[in-house]
Image (cartoon, rainbow, N blue to C red):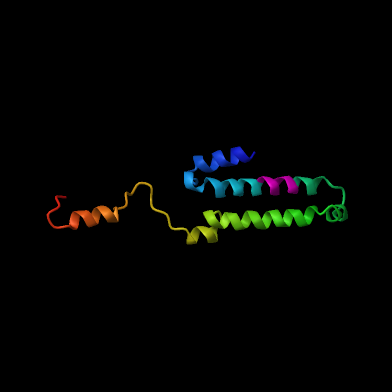
Amino acid sequence: MRFLRWKHLVALGLAAAIDRALLACWCEAWAEWVDLVAAVDEVETYAEAIKLGLLNAKARAREELLKLAQQFGFSPSARARVHANDQGEEQADPFEAFLTRRPGRKA
């Protein structure tokens, strides 16, 4: 499941090579949260889920998942803070601009 989540993010263009480690952590957090949701659903009573520590573990996993999600703009409020270059637009290289402004340098 973790690998499939990673492949999904790469296919959507949301992952770059430099993001791999942090995204791997997010995938782990996602898988842990999904497993804990399933575990809570399998117990017979709410009291049993509390006794087994499943609710606390699920809450911690959710918090970790949300914390990591903020890094990538995986929520509407986080996306509002993310500024990315359009893939279709090539950004000017500041060093190249500096070189072309130097006297005696051909552009």
Q: Quadrant of residue 100?
A: bottom left
Residue 59 at what x, y percent from top left?
72, 57
Residue 20 at what x, y percent from top left?
53, 45
**Above or below: residue 47 compared with residue 6:** below
Looking at the image, which residue is at 58% across and 45% down? 24
Looking at the image, which residue is at 56% across and 57% down? 70
Residue 16 at what x, y percent from top left?
47, 45
Q: In this orientation, which residue lies closer to the viewer: 104 or 50?
A: 104
Is residue 58 shown in magenta?
no
Q: Is residue 89 left or right of residue 99?
A: right
Magenta: main secondary structure equals helix
Q: Which residues are magenta?
A: 31-37
Is residue 34 shown in magenta?
yes
Q: Is residue 19 visible?
A: yes
Q: Is residue 16 visible?
A: no
Which quarter of the rendered picture does the N terminus lie within?
A: top right
Residue 23 at what x, y percent from top left?
56, 48
